[in-house]
Amino acid sequence: MLGTTLTFEANLAAAGACGRLVAGRDWSGTALGPLAGWPQSLRTATLLLLRSPVPMVMLWGEDGIMLYNDAYSVFAGGRHPALLGSRVREGWPEVADFNDRVMRVGLSGGTLSYRDQELTLYRYGRPEQVWMNLDYSPVLDESGRPAGVLCVLAETTGRVAAERELRGGEARLSAIFAGATVGLSEVGLDGRFLRVNEELCRILGRTADDLLSFTIADVTHPADVRPSRDALVRSIRTGGTASLDKRYRRPDGSIVWANSRVTRLNLASGEPGNLLVATVDLTERLAVEERLRASEARFRLMADAVPQIVWITDAEGRVAFFNRQWTAYTGAPHEPATAAGIADAHVHPDDVAPTMAAFEAARRSGGTFLVEHRIRSAGGDYRWFLVRAEPYRDPAGGAVLHWFGASVDIHDRKLAETALRALNADLEREVGERTRERGMIWRHSLDLLSVIDLATATFDAVNPAWSAALGWATGEIEGRSYAGFVHPDDAGASDAAFAQVRRGDPVLRFENRYRARDGAWHWLSWVAVPEGGKLYAVTRDVTEEKAARAALEAAQEALRQSQKMEAMGQLTGGVAHDFNNLLTPIVGSLDLLQRRGVGGEREQRLIAGAVQSADRAKTLVQRLLAFARRQPLQARAVDVARLVTGMGDLVASTTGPQIRVVVEVPEGLPPAMGDLNQLEMALLNLSVNARDAMPEGGTLRISAGVEAVEAGHRATLRPGPYIRLSVADTGTGMDEATLARAVEPFFSTKGIGKGTGLGLSMVHGLASQLGGALTMRSRPGLGTHVELWLPLSDAAPDQPETGVEAPDAPPARRTALLVDDEDLVRMSTADMLEDLGYTVIEAGSGEEAMRLVARGEPFDLLVTDHLMPGITGTDLARALRTARPGVPVLLVSGYAESEGVAADLPRLVKPFRKADLAASLAQLAAG
């Protein structure tokens, strides 16, 4: 009503919910007293805060009695309305110290102001972090003294939390940027790097400081600069993402492939900002793609090598792959097609529907696709195929992704099944006649015919061929289970085959071993079909067939091994020949220096050491030539008994006292064809090997004997009598894998520096070169037995020679024509000849020597290398015999070649010393 003044209580009731609470409360029990007694300053301040839309609270008096408005009640949460009229220390005990300070400052007339003040409050019975803007000022009473404190409050928790989240997000973004597994960079609109992470530095091989001084174009391969710039421009213009595979240049000049995705970062205003470039190193991906291509190529090669038709489709049946057998059989090239399309085009019309029904059933169930149908060949005829495919599933979700299948030609099996079914039908229709015919077949068939009960697995009947093959009477077989005759190792496979027949599927060409009455095991090949609860089988004894096949495979393997060894022999023989050409001037020159006493005592020691090393190299070359079967052999009758007994003491001294050496040679042992020196070396090599196999001691047994070799002997020799020279030890022995490689050149089980790996290879080559063989038997822990087989000799063995040293020079000075295409060899040989008293005429080729002969150059001796370009030494010798029949010829060679060399030409083998040359010339002069 106009002019009407409301009472204090009425004004409180009109000041919101909190005003009504103040008006309705009995304040007489508080320090404020009844409403009617409130001083005007309190009333005015109370109405002021109650009407304010801003959260406000007044703390009155020394106790800080709390009066607040509706906005503050929202802030107070679950503590409202209990806070109204309570002491501030009791109302907010968790911040009592804070409010005590507020009261002290305010009641003393001071003000306080806080921004984003963090406090922990229990507004809803649990602690929570709260941020507020707080402004405190004193409220004066009628006397002008502070009687209370007024607080204006604004909660900033949401803003503070948002700012903190923003800062945390930026920190996380920086951490993600720095630790990303892809290269990340922030690039300006001009293409310059502004920020890069470690992964990008790794990819580009540069430091962050380096990159921040470059643009993208600076580190891009020149050929990719323009596409890269286009991608940046496209992203800036459209605001979208541009992606390209490109090459980057590293500081060392290497190139790295990477995928870069460019994205424009917009400013808050929406204007284009910088660019974010994500770079992924494609090195591994490209390597994986290359491995995938190689794997696919290997798969295709493997699939094309399979004799069956191999194919792959996707989950829906769209053909992705056919091997070449498909085109070879159907004549149709592989083109994209569906399973239905393939069936319509190539499968027999009667089989199309069953085939597609089976495929759809497999697709629904996710199981094996299995069907038999006829496929038309390129010639137009149809053949039966067994088609089987298995699903390939997604490793993650399990969904079928592909079908991998094969189509196997079973036409012959189907014909056999048809024939057997037709035979059974004919038997049922014509019982009488067919029974007689069957009886004839049953009694006289060479195949093993049988009937087995599928329920009991016992023989119901067998034909007489069983008795002929295995020796059992038919009554001893009938009524017994087939399992009682099967070899233990074949039991599982036989049971599986029998179970297959029980399921109604025929078994074709199944093989297992049956025990004969005499205990021997025979291989049987079965064709079995089920009918009326019985198994009807046609069986053949294939024991001899398998043995013949095994023998053929063994012969083929032996042939392959022989070809391998021959190839390696040609290689090592050629190397040894060249090495002999190198050794000849070395050995000759050292020999001349040693004989002439060049230098003092120290120089002579050095020359002697060099001579010793050259001799060792010469021995190594002889071993290589022995392995290559090209060593110069003086094959003649050898008294093996005298050889073995004569070397007993040498072997004993070589092996040491821990090894007992036993020599066993029968009386009257005939001579063998061989080279005495090489056989001595072979025997010594075998003995040293035996010694090394017995580090703790043992027995070394050397024996010899005569043995007649028959066809099929383990030594694979021609039938006839042979001398068997045997070396056996009780050492560590060898397993099958080591034994198989024992005679390979350079293969050794000894430590590094303890063997050349040529010893057994040399013995093997020697035996082969002499027309014999080397056989070995060994078992781990039981020792090794090595046998050297030598052909017999019809001639009597030579008696031991006392050895007369050849004279250094002929009685009178003579002239020698020396021919060799190797300058160093020719020079060394010329020095030796001159030391032996010859005047030497040198020629560097056969053609040059022929010109000297044609010119009438006088000489008394021809010394010529054999292998030379153009005219060989042998050709030169033949021409000289025609032109000058009386001139002697000495042929020099790196190894004893037999092709194109006359048997009556004297030969000297490289490398040689002056004494060797003198001895050969002396023999030549002796005629």
Image: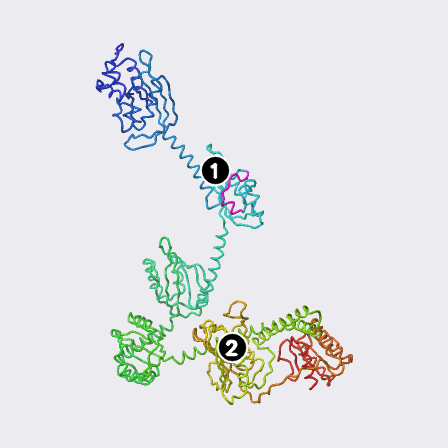
Q: Secondary structure at mark 2?
A: helix
Q: Is residue 630 left or right of residue 721?
A: right
What's the amino acid at mark 2?
Ser
Q: Position of residue 495 (x, y in %)?
A: 30, 72
Q: Secondary structure at mark 1?
A: strand
Image quadrant containing the N terminus? top left
Of residue 375 and residue 861, the one placed in the foreground of this image is 861
Q: Is residue 826 left or right of residue 486?
A: right
Of residue 832 and residue 150, the one placed in the foreground of this image is 832
Colour scheme employed for the rendering of this structure: rainbow
Residue at the far top in the pictured view: 3
Q: Which residue is mark 1?
A: 265
| Mark found first going from the N terminus, 2 or 1 | 1
Q: Which residue is mark 2?
A: 687
- Number of disc labels: 2
Of residue 534 and residue 795, the one placed in the foreground of this image is 795
Residue at 43% in and 73% down: 781
Is 470 placed above or below 27 here? below
Q: Position of residue 6 (x, y in %)?
A: 25, 13
Residue stretch rendered in magenta on the structure? 190-204
Of residue 397 and residue 831, the one placed in the foreground of this image is 831
**Disc 2 to disc 1: CB gap under 8 Å:** no
Quarter of the rendering containing residue 897: bottom right
